[in-house]
Amino acid sequence: YNNPELNMKNWKINSWRKYPVKHIPTYDDEGELNSVLNKLKTFPPLVFAGETRHLKDQLAKVVDGKAFLLQGGDCAESFAEFHPDNIRDTFKVILQMALVMTYSASLPIVKLGRIAGQFSKPRSAPTEKQGNIELPSYLGDNINAIDFNEKARRPDPKRMYKAYSQSASTLNLLRAFSKGGFADLNKVHLWNLDYIKKSPQAKKFKDLEDKIADALAFMEACGITSDFNNRLYTVNFWTSHEALHLPFEESMTRVDSTTGEYHDTSAHFVWIGDRTRQLDGGHVEFCRGIENPIGIKCGPTSKPEEIAKICEVLNPKNEKGKITLISRFGHQNVEKFLPKLIRRIKKEGLNVIWSCDPMHGNTIVSTTGFKTRPFNNVVNEVKNVFGVHQSEGSYAGGLHVEMTGQDVTECTGGARKISDADLSSRYHTHCDPRLNSDQALELAFLISDEIKKNSSYSKNAIQAAS
Ligand code: PEP
Ligand code: CO
């Protein structure tokens, strides 16, 4: 499989500028914007090419049904919520979710944060009205500020410096946690957050801790300990965000001196949003030239033939691990849209990871006026997606969630039965409602049976085919 028409001949780091682009801010002072971008080009890369290649290798295993992808974090990171405890707690919950999934699926989990760079947001309306006042919408902390006044809402290029610096220190802490002993399997009991200890998930997680402790004791008796095996002591944790703000992404894109290839060094993995995946648009053009693994969000308006074509453009060599299709149809729309998409991708023989985002198709407004997502609908979308993949004979290989380690009240339902009236108590998100750590862990437990079925099913399917 190779399409000779598609080659890199016409790609340049800035060739996206010749194409129409959506959701990129206009700045008043172009001179100031360019001086910020030029300065960013001289800043150190946040990730390096070898890491990105390593992640792609891990993702290739997901394509083959030998691993599972867990991607999670804030909808939008913010300057206001920047705090080491918040980074630590989100990291802890992702580790806990991954542990639950590893245990049930007996598969390695590729852990990918929506973190250390997830700042820019596509908004459904360009302006926001409060009373008689209409102002430009909030576009993410690296562009403008959330406060409702004219000055705050003016795009300010200098905010990119602050976002870069927050990303760098977030990543630094994540690297320390991943490699410095915090992720040691002997310390799983320390990952529990204080408030989760009192939660309905605590007992289930404690049972899992005990089983892991037994397994580790057995392994230790056999001489396998974290002193000898790095795998028990460290984890690989990768970063991702939406490649929305192309001027910023361009300025973080560098040539890898060992291969001559371009890497977007702002994150290991980037994705193209549901609103910016036009085939003739600048976002697809930019992403076709970088080596990073790329996600493509697929919503109800995506046509299967267009998604297939985008895959070809982004991945002309049909490399495994390069493309992750992230479906986000809404819990009631899965059966309507997903089978057609799967069939088309299969027919073209395209290698993709099938990931499920059960958040973005399930956003509603609560009776109390908050943007929210009912937990049951989130769970149902995941279950429906797994069901469709089983009947189509494809491997459901990933989960993409908006979540936080904080005890927020943004999504309704879950074991603590958050109601519409409860939402106002701790509603902190700068954009979409996130699962709190209790709901995130509950989701991992609730879908663990599906993951188990799915992985044994796909193992059988792969065996039968070979
Ligand atoms: C997001 O992931 O925050 C997002 C905006 O998603 P989508 O592009 O799928 O709407
Ligand atoms: Co979102």
Image (cartoon, rainbow, N blue to C red):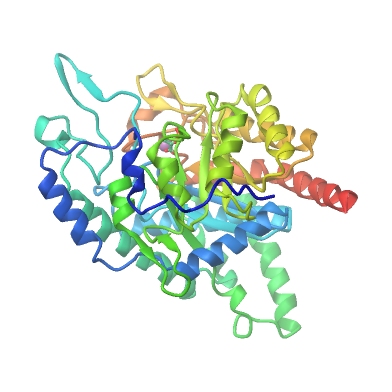
> In this picture, is 337 found above or below 161?
above
On the rendering, which quadrant does ligand 2 occupy? top left
Q: Residue at x 14, y 36 (%)?
A: 154
Q: Residue 218 is drawn in which quadrant?
A: bottom right
Q: Residue at x 59, y 72 (%)?
A: 186
Q: Is residue 18 left or right of residue 215?
A: left
> In this picture, is 388 found above or below 41?
above
Residue 293 percent across, percent down from the top left? 52, 54
Residue 37 percent across, percent down from the top left? 21, 54
**In-front residue for pair 356/28:** 28
> In this picture, is 305 found above or below 240?
above
Q: Is residue 140 left or right of residue 118?
A: left
Residue 12 percent across, percent down from the top left? 37, 53
Q: Residue at x 57, y 50 (%)?
A: 315
**In-front residue for pair 372/4:** 4
Taking the view exactly as shown, the residue that stands out farthest to the top is 132
Q: State whether residue 194 appears in this view.
A: no
Q: Is residue 194 left or right of residue 201?
A: left
Residue 125 percent across, percent down from the top left? 31, 23
